[in-house]
Image (cartoon, rainbow, N blue to C red):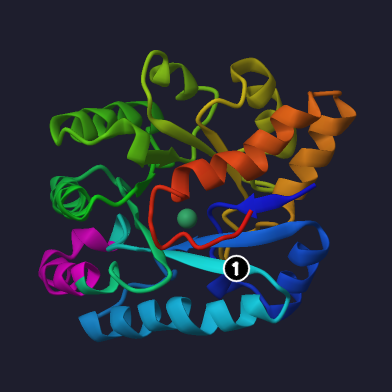
Amino acid sequence: MRIIEPHCHMISRVTDDYERMALAGIEAVVEPSFWLGAPRTSAGTFVDYFELIIDWETQRAKLFGIDHFTCIAMNPREANNVPLTQEVLPVVAQYCRRETCVAIGEIGFDRQTDAEEAAIRAQLQLAKKLDMPVVIHLPHQFKKVGTERTLKVVTDEKMNPGKVLLDHNTEETMPLYAGTKFWRGLSIYPITKLTIERAANIVEQYGVERLLVNSACDWGPSDPLNVPKLVQELVVRKFPRDQIEQLVFRNPIAFYGQSDRWTFKA
Ligand SMILES: [Zn+2]
């Protein structure tokens, strides 16, 4: 099956992972900017990181015929360093115009502080000004209240819901989207957060409209093949093939295709 991996941190993976992903049917990946596991101390390290994912990761992906796209942002956790955020936001405004950048992201809440909210609002306003899609990370702790707060902020900022993806949902947050047009994401992890089985249950319960699934595949315990593995699980459960294809291929195209830098040829 043709697959697009809509949220993966390839900077954390070895080159062999790209090969395995290509063999499993993944044709394009989107790499949002994130927290690297240790706090950065200056805006310069963000410049180097953005350059690396825009240029080097794109080259590594190309070796296996995979198209590589990026999302650029100040991440939720480091947004708590307010002086650093003030230095980095202009860098974000510059780098989100680069050739592979298809969205602002990932922004969002981590510890749900006011500093994080200020960084979210600044970057939502940037996205609106540039008419770009936005990828929003939902907090892992106190997730329901964090999701409600996130929905309030995006509604306050009058964002077009069709251009907003809220990622890292669970059984607890999915009902919050009833009647809305926001895109919802599920991140599938081998140990922590959502397993393949739980993700498959959510897909069966809620259907595939405005839903994206990803492996995140960051520096923690994670698996870059979790989207193909979810496909396999859904096939075994006899979930309709056309809907699986919508979930893992047509939906990512519909969301990121709202950017004119999305050059993937379906
Ligand atoms: Zn992420």
Q: Answer whether residue 202 is magenta in the image.
A: no
Tag 1: residue type? Answer: Asp
Residue 53: percent from left, percent from top: 46, 76
Quadrant housing residue 40:
bottom left
Q: Is residue 106 left or right of residue 19?
A: left
| The one of 132 and 88 positioned closer to us in this rendering | 132
Quadrant housing residue 229:
top right
Residue 134: percent from left, percent from top: 33, 48
Which residue: 57% across, 54% down?
216
Q: Is residue 128 left or right of residue 167?
A: left
Crowding at label 1, few (<14), some or many (≥20) Cα neighbours within 10 Å?
Answer: many
| The one of 106 and 111 positioned closer to us in this rendering | 106
Residue 59: percent from left, percent from top: 58, 83
Quadrant housing residue 65:
bottom right
> Magenta region: which residues?
78-93
Which residue: 81% across, 58% down?
24
Q: Answer whether residue 91 is magenta in the image.
A: yes
Q: Is residue 174 left or right of residue 90?
A: right
Name the residue tied to disc 1. 67
Can residue 231 be spotted in the picture?
yes
Question: Looking at the picture, does residue 211 appear above or below residue 177?
Answer: below
Element type where label 1 sits in the image: strand
